[in-house]
Every structure is written in structure tokens, then in C-alpha cells.
Image: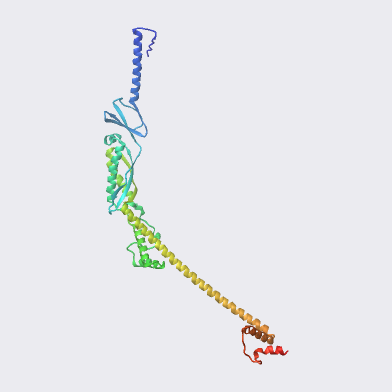
Amino acid sequence: MTVVKLNPKSKGPKGAMGLAVLGVVGIAGVIGFFGLSSAMYTIHEVEQAVVVQFGNPVREVTEAGLYFKIPMIQEVRRFDRRLHAWDGEPNEMPTAGGEFIYVDTTARWRIVEPQLFLESVGDESRARARLNDIIDSVVRDQIAGTDLVEIVRSSDWGAVPTQTIKTPVPDSVDDDASKDSEDEAEQLDLPDELAQAELQLERDELKALTEKVEMGRQELTRKILKKSRVMVEDYGIELIDVQIKRINYNEKVQEEAYRRMISDQQRRAERFRSEGQGQSARILGEARRELAEIRSEAERKAQIIRGEADAEATKIYNEAFSSDPEFYELYRTLESYHKTVNSKSTLLLGTDAEYYRYLRSASSK
């Protein structure tokens, strides 16, 4: 390494030349530093990149590390290698049965071939636009060929415990089962129309629960994912998962469903009211019957007690009065005076009447 010593006080061509050389070296150093820094670039663990030269991809970088490129000629386009979320807009679409429903879907995707991704779509916003077209079209096709019960339910919902069903619901019930259901309705003291409506409602509910599901929502989403994944491979994208977030009826069908729900609940409420009224009448009848039995038994016991008391009183009177019959006769006569003779009584009797026998004897004494 050569050290050039310059004397700032020196004058002449040699000193000026030294200053010029120092300036050139400094400028060259600065240019070299910026050139070297612009030639280096770093790829992080969550990134992947494509090196572009004059607008054309020349190579892709998928591993983290320090790399070099040609300054001013090549540039680096970076892409996130992590999962990206895609949320579609709820769209109205018909099912195989003709019901119009709103389907809201979501998906997870990532970039696996950055160079193909750059060449086909360019950036993530355009990739989401392509996913909108692809996934929405696949979902619409699958929904249009699937019954509503297959979309709403999963295949593992078909088994319903038999003990949760009070009445036989399938249409193919035998006569004995129907007779048992009618007997149960009669035991509840329900009106005939209400009982039949309740039984029909339970039949419809069990039929909806036990209706055989060939595919179910899980298998439906698997088919959507499989078909969509094949279509996005041409864009350097890997589709990880597709799920149906929400299914909703349109306004007309929703209102009809709400009306049916309200009607079902009203039938249930009417059934409960009828059951309550029947139970109330039964309880009141039993209470009145028990009250009548209690009163009758109490009256019977009271009559027995009164009879026994009268007999005992008569016995005591007989024993008391038998000791002095003449006094008893006098006592009974005086009692009759008290009950029959008062200030308003008028008696027409002779002086020798037996009624005043004790009075005559008392006056003669």
C-alpha cells in the first residue's frame, strides 16, 4: 500500500496532482461502496424473491441468505412465503333443490413458485382477484349440484338416538305404532287437531335429522378445494384450505323459514298449554275428590262422636235422675214452663189441670 504524503504548503504542479489523485480515489471509493451495497441483497426466512433483468425474470431465490446481483441492471422482487388469507364476498346461488342461499367462503393460500407467480399474476392483489374468480366459480358449480341438506349438515350427523324421539316419526310406521301415538295424545288430553299437528311436526323433525346424507359439508369443501387447487397451480399458488364460513337464506326464503319456525313454536306452546290445562283439571279434580272424601270421613267421625257423647250424656242423666225420680219429674216440668210460658203466652187451662200440679201443691203448703 502506497502512502502519498502531500504538503499543503507546497505549490506547483506536483502538489496539485496529488490533490487530484486523492479526490479521484475518494470518489472511486464512494462509488465502489454504493455499487457493492447495491449489488448485495438479503432474503429473510419469511421471504422469497425473483431477480429481474430488464423486466425479465432471470432466477428465483427461495432460501434465506445474502446474495448478489448486477447493480443498476437487475432488481429484486420480493414475495411473502407465509400463508395468505382470502375472504370472498357472500354470493347468492341456487342449490340442486332450487333454494336460493347466500354462501360465504374463505381460503388460505401461499406462493410456492415465485417466478411463475410473477409472470402470471404479478402481485398479491391480482392474485386475490384471480382467486375470487376461480373459487367463486367452483363454489357456485358445487352448490348448484348439491342438495341443501348436504350443504348444511355433515355426514356424521345422521345417527339420532332413538330414546330422544317420543313418537314414531317415519312415514312407514305400522298401525300399532300409530295407535300408540294416538293413545299418547289422548292421555295428554290434547285436542285432536293439535295432537295430529304435534305428531306431524315431530315426524318432520325426525325426518330432517335422520335423512341420509350422501356427502355432507366436509366432503363438499374437500371437492371445492381439490378442483380449485388444480386451477391455481398455473399461477404458482398452492391452495391450502377452503371452508364455507356461513350459509344463509335469501330474504324470501328466510321469511318463510322464520314463519315456519314461529308456527312450530306456537304449536309447541299450544301443546304445552293444553298439557298444563289438562294437568290442572286433573289435579283440581283429584283435590276436590280428596276434599269430599276428607269432609265425608270427618262428618262420619263427628256423627259417631256426637252419638257416643249423647249416649254418654243420656246415661249420666239416667243415672243422676234415677236416684231421685220425683226431683227429675219436677225438673222436667220446670223446664217445660221455661220453654212454653213467657210474657206473650196465653194458656187456657182449668184449675185442676195436671200441668199446674206442682204449683197447686206448692201453694197448698
Horizontal side of 283 relative to 257 (left or right) equals right
Q: In which quarter of the image is residue 113?
A: top left
Q: In which quarter of the image is residue 209?
A: bottom left
Q: In this view, does 236 lie above or below 154?
A: above
Across and down, in percent, residue 300 comes to 55, 77
Horizontal side of 190 relative to 101 (left or right) equals right
Q: Please say whether residue 216 is visible from this viewpoint.
A: no
Across and down, in percent, residue 152 comes to 33, 52
Across and down, in percent, residue 212 comes to 32, 56
Q: Which residue lies furthest to the right in this view?
A: 365
Q: Is residue 103 above or below residue 193?
A: above
Q: In this view, does 28 lie above or below 97?
A: above
Q: Measuring 49% from the left and 71% from the top, which residue is drawn there?
A: 288
Q: Measuring 43% from the left and 66% from the top, which residue is drawn there?
A: 277
Across and down, in percent, residue 332 comes to 65, 85
Q: Quadrant of the C terminus?
A: bottom right
Q: Quadrant of the N terminus?
A: top left
Q: Nearer the viewer, residue 340 or 325?
A: 340
Horizontal side of 344 relative to 178 (left or right) equals right
Q: Measuring 67% from the left and 90% from the top, which residue is drawn there?
A: 357
Q: Is residue 12 above or below residue 259?
A: above
